[in-house]
Amino acid sequence: MKMHTNNFVDPTRLKTPTFINSFKSGCEFGRNAPKELLRYLSLRIVKFCTNSITQDEIILLNYKRSYLLKLSDRFNVYERGVEFPDIGKYLKKFLNFFEKLGDKSVLDFNEIEMINTYFPDFDSAFDAFFTELSLKNSINIDDDEPNDLCLLHELLVHTHFNRVNAEAYALSLRDQLIDIGYIAAICSNLTFHGNEKQMTKYITQIADELNLIAIHTFNYICNSLANAWPDVYHQIIKEKFKSLEITSSSARVLAMIIDSALKIIGETGEKNFQYQILIAKMGVQEQYYVGLPNYCSHKTGVYGHNVIINRINVNLSDFASIELQDGKMLKLRNFALKLNSTLKTEMDEIYNKETSYIVKQVKKKLPIFISDRLFKCWTMLRLYGDHWWSSCGNLTYAKRSYGYAELSGIASLRYETKGGAFGLCEKFLFNFFM
């Protein structure tokens, strides 16, 4: 329709009666007529997208992604070294099946027969899984069948709340809306034969609809991306443990997981945030954590590890924003040095005590240090020997600080006792997140 509109306004093009009648008909009745296009967009973007995606809904979506992760663990794939693909590749079809399944018990792993079959790759295994669901439950799924009536919901769910993809879609939609407005302006003159009153009414209706779609899209996407914190971020890390086929933990391996996850996390959720992550092995190590939920999030039991994600609001395209945060981080680093001297004095007095007691005493001696203006969260890692004569070994953890600044966003304070005289050796690592 836009090409015909350009031809219509081009003074060098000959406008035959047939062309004019065809263009006028397209303005009023064609499937690409401005009102028809807006009717479709209003339906799929406004009417069917009433509310933004909530955090509770995101938790349920992550549950379904995690189900596919656990299912893939049970697949018998010849080449286990094959890189595990993005789980989102199979999510759309699974969601279609999930909505149509009456009895969800068929998803119990013990009920799935194809698990006992060998496959050359994950794609073949998932194809067999979907085929079994289809045959057993008499469900037919068209690969092109939309899972979602709301275009915005479908976009965010199947890109796992990727902000870059959402922004690209929004820009494409903006251009489409501009084109519709342009076509409508030309069509109005032809359709209403220059009647100013009717033209104004038509254009006003079109403009109102364009504004409604644009504003609703902006609000829906922004609110949904904001709700991605923190559950989507933890799911990304969880899926990295699976996709990288981690069999044993080391500081190097955990750092590799963080680096890989940060590439995706940097494009996820709200704009103008930077992230830092700490992953620590569970088991013989003990950990204590406290933090402000809007800035920090802690998750336990991620393939045998604890994960802390910390974020800071900074616009990397704004030098003043960067300079402001750097100044805050420098002040907090100096504050951490004062905390360090207090910690060492106090730790000498609470040797080999219970972790809960140590935390209680440390909180008594230290000034308030968790707030919107100070540190956003802190964690204590503790490792001690099995016997008074055994060594402590090393704490198994990895961390990555904000990638934009010269200063580290995590202040780490260490404390160690070697043991002896029937006391256990101890290693502590206090991490204060800026």
Image (cartoon, rainbow, N blue to C red):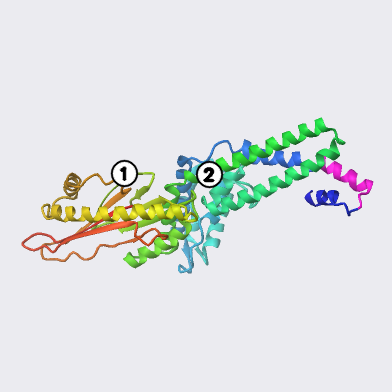
The amino acid type found where label 2 is placed reads Cys
The amino acid type found where label 1 is placed reads Ser
State the residue in front, 238 or 353: 353
Residue 165: percent from the left, percent from the top? 57, 53
Q: Residue furthest top?
A: 197
Looking at the image, residue 57 lies above or below residue 66? above
State the residue in front, 336 or 171: 336
State the residue in front, 323 or 11: 323
- Magenta range: 14-27
Which residue, given by chain and number where applicable, does mark 1 sit on?
A: 371
Residue 190: percent from the left, percent from the top? 85, 40
Residue 260 on the magenta span: no
The earlier-in-sequence mark between 1 and 2 is 2
The kind of secondary structure the magenta stretch mainly shows is helix
Looking at the image, residue 4 lies above or below residue 408? above
Q: Residue at x 42, y 47 (%)?
A: 230
Which residue, given by chain and number where applicable, does mark 2 sit on?
A: 222
Q: Are marks 1 and 2 in contact (CB under 8 Å)?
A: no
Residue 199: percent from the left, percent from the top? 80, 34
- Residue at disc 2, secondary structure: helix
Residue 26 on the magenta span: yes
Task: Say whether residue 205 is visible.
Answer: yes
The answer to whether residue 127 is left or right of residue 319 is right
> What is the C-alpha distance between the residues marked 1 and 2?
26 Å
Question: Hey, which quadrant is residue 258 in on the image?
Answer: bottom left
Nearest to viewer (mark 1 / mark 2): 1
- Residue at disc 1, secondary structure: loop
